[in-house]
Amino acid sequence: MVASAANLTLNDELFYRVVPEDQGFDSDYAGIFHFRIWKANRWIDVVVDDRLPTMDGALIFMKSRAGDEFWSALLEKAYAKSREWSLVSESERESIGLTFDADGEFWMSERDFLKEFHFLEICNLGPDALDQDMLTDSSKKKWEVSIFEGAWVRDTFWVNPQYFITLEDPDDDDEEQNCTLIVALMQKNRRAARTLGAGLFLTIGFALYKIDDPDHCPNPLDMAFFKFNPSAARSHTFINSREVTTRFSLPPGTYCVVPSTFEPNQTGEFLLRVFTEKKNVSVEHDEKVAIIPPDDNVRAKEEDPSSERAQMLRALFAKIAGDDMEVNSLELQKILNMVFKKAAVEDEGENEIRSEQFALDVCRSMVALMDDDHSGKLGLEEFRALWILIRTWKNVFTAFDKDGSGYLSTFELRAALHSAGYLVNQHILKALVLRYGNDDGNIAFEDFIGCAVKLRTMIEVFKEKDPRNLGSAVFTIDEWLENTMYC
């Protein structure tokens, strides 16, 4: 920390980016200061008060030789990394030769350095920190950088996030007409995960695959692709480190970068950065969120109104609904819990799903999905339309719960949603697993129904505000709260 702070003073632009100029002890002093700290590819503004620990009238931790200079001590407080060093006693500091003036600089022999230190990390400026004054006269080139944030969910290699990188122009000075590509994969928020019982770092790495026809390949790449196509390049190692970085020299073309953990079924967040000498085209290779028709083999048919089951269902609906022939969420719950295990099996189906009764909250979401007039109730025709959806979702769950466990894995969930008519990407899948999965990331039948209902509702609400299918919509705060709170 001392060396990092000292290095800041060598570059005014970087110093004032970390220690903003618009603050001091003179005018408008409020007893607080703010600093900008670079973390996981973004600047975070951290505010601290002006209280600093002292002993015998002197600062205990980082300090400047000038008695009236406090930015370094306040920055250290904002960074909140002084606790470890404070646990080292003065005698231990003397025994390892780490007693020095508070100027941010110390010297030691190479032998002692190799003896006392196991790792050396060299920090470098990112492309956004370079300006024309920093670039040398012999080279005015700057790295082109693409940045992606993603996460691993519990599953196997081929369902990891995928990123397409297109290299168009070879490097100027490359005799083989290749392109320089640097891939850096960093784990995020692992210290927070460690407090919850996880290890500090996962064992991570990445692979690159050559894509011969990017316009006509599966989206995302499927298991068959990885089965029959070897990787074109890989990270130099898979290691339990905060970041893995490898430099490549590759012919122009399109490549798929697949970041992954070494062990399957591990979860975590990551930051992927791709650097090239020439401009590149980088996109996440995944599906666009949409509703499509469900697969024919799971789609429930509309029942013949004269059939015994349809008449039984109508009679039960009329009995519970009463004179107004409408049901609220509590009455809908009664109907579903009474008839589901007896009458919801498709004509050709024979297997029942072992499930708890439908929760009231799920039934509320069902009413919100079908309630076009926002009356809080469903009429008979709305119920019939809902019943077709429920039977379809049940057929889907049965088809993809191949081991009959009563749960869908993360991989099975994405495939099941696709079969039910929902296209979701990795980011949405992660949110769904966190919201509807158990501790192992598996989805029970009732949670799958709740997931399908909420997805359909939210997509339809969005589509109403995006009639031109631009992928963006504008909501007022009233509209947003009305729609999200009701569903």
Image: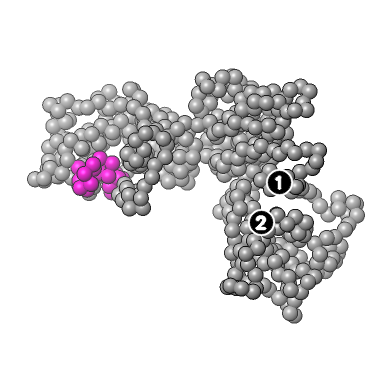
Residue 470 or residue 295, whichever sits in front: 470
Q: What residue type is labelled 2?
A: Arg
Q: Give the range drawn in magenta.
A: 357-378
The residue at the point 59 percent across, 43 percent down is: 270
Is residue 100 in sight in this rendering? yes
Using the numbered discs, state the Cα–Cα distance from disc 2 to disc 1 in whole angstroms.
Answer: 13 Å
Amino acid type, callout 1: Leu
Residue shown at 85% from the left, 60% from the top: 106
Seen in the image, is 47 located left or right of residue 323?
right
Was residue 215 drawn as part of the magenta stretch in this picture? no
Q: Mark 1 points at which residue?
A: 130
59 sits left or right of 146 in the view: right
Horizontal relation, residue 250 to residue 452: left or right? right
Is the residue 26 above or below the residue 308 in the image? Answer: below
Q: Which residue, given by chain and number where applicable, does mark 2 sit on?
A: 17
The residue located at (51%, 20%) in the rendering is: 216
**Callout 2 secondary element:** helix
Near-viewer residue (20 or 421): 20
